[in-house]
Image (cartoon, rainbow, N blue to C red):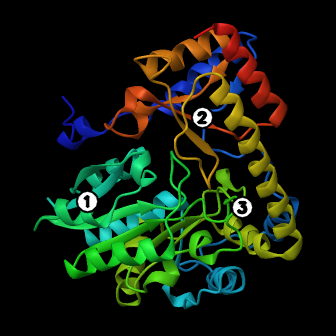
Amino acid sequence: MLHRSTRLDEIQPFHVMELLRRARELEAQGRDIIHMEVGEPDFPTPQPIVEAATRFIAGGDVHYTPGLGLPALREAIARFYHDRFGADVSPERIIVTSGASGALMLALAATTDPGDEWLLPDPGYPSNRHLVRSFEGCARALPVDAASRYQPTPAQVDAAWSERVRGLMVATPSNPTGTLLSTAEIATLYGVTHARRGVLLVDEIYQGLTYGVESSTALAHPALNAADDLFIVNSFSKYFGMTGWRLGWLVAPSGIVRDIEKLAQHFFISPSTPAQHAALAAFRPETLEILEARRREFAARRDTLLPALRSLGFTVATEPQGAFYIYADVSKLTEDSEALARRLIEEAGVAATPGLDFGHHLPRQHLRIAYTTRRERLLEAAERIARLKL
């Protein structure tokens, strides 16, 4: 019989993707499903990006790039940090990657030894803990709730630290809750990890998708303003609308970039060349104008969905200020959010993600609901739920 790695027993399925599969099955049967489960913007890739890719591919010169990515793209990302957020970072610290997942893989591979522990907020993005395990580390959950805006506190991190802990992973804006960390909060968390000779890794893949805090650099982009000696994961998927292009980047401490380059060469050879040339157009003024209009639309969607959910009995104790999710407490409606999610999709044609995907801290009490569809569809979803008389 084929030998299976024992680590596979600890890798759980990505439940939202299985929910999406069921939604597709129902659609194939002729059902109309309102998709509020998957973290993917419904907007197409901005046309300037598509046109840049088309021109590049038409030239036929599609070969490998350096393992760290196109120098021109690394420089463009550095300029974007400076122009948009007033944050200075050397292009040499920027590694272009095969999606944000590729960036996280490189950061973990470069820092994690077998048995090392990483502290992760719970609820949090499910793939993070499984990638830690894939590199022979152990993910330790830090239960967080609305009282701390679903973010870990310095006291909580300090109390959980042990000799086996390698680092702390946080997200701002976070998935599934959409909450933010300020520059001061990042700096304090960095102080805790740095004092223990640990690593701070900040997931910022929803950076740019913030609402009501755009004039505040401290909230809109905190990490680079807090410290240099940390890792930052980012992506072209969310704000830039390039999910299927599979392109992200990692900002790493300068002293470890050469080591990460070696890993990148072996893992990926290089990121997608057409995607990189397309991404050069992501920072053009005409593209950013499109993206900002979409950000304003996401804000309007959030403001449409929040009162509609509350009128149905959903509790949202901490309003999201970023990303495109509402993490709703459904304990007034059900004892089992997974059962509720199944009922919503089967009986109402509304797909939402149960808290089970995001960790072990009160998952049965929560649903993640994505406002990645049009406002009229969000209101229609609320009407369908209302008819169920939960």
Residue at image position (40%, 54%) is 148
Horizontal arrangement in the rendering, residue 196 relative to residue 175 (left or right): left
Q: Which residue is mark 2?
A: 369
Q: Please name which of the two marks, 2 or 3, marks the residue nearer to the observer.
A: 2
Q: Tell me: residue 242, above or below residue 257.
A: above
| Nearer-N-terminus badge (2/1) | 1
Q: Position of residue 363 (x, y in %)?
A: 38, 32
Label 3 is placed on what type of residue?
Answer: Phe
Q: Nearer the viewer, residue 377 or 306?
A: 306
Label 1 is placed on what type of residue?
Answer: Gln
Alpha carbon of mark 2 to alpha carbon of mark 3: how far? Answer: 21 Å
Q: Which residue is mark 1?
A: 156
Q: Which residue is mark 3?
A: 240
Residue at image position (10%, 68%) is 163
Q: Quadrant of the N terminus?
A: top left
| Residue 86 appears anywhere in the view | yes
For the residue carrying disc 2, how many other residues have a C-alpha within 10 Å: few (<14), some (14-19), or many (20+)? many
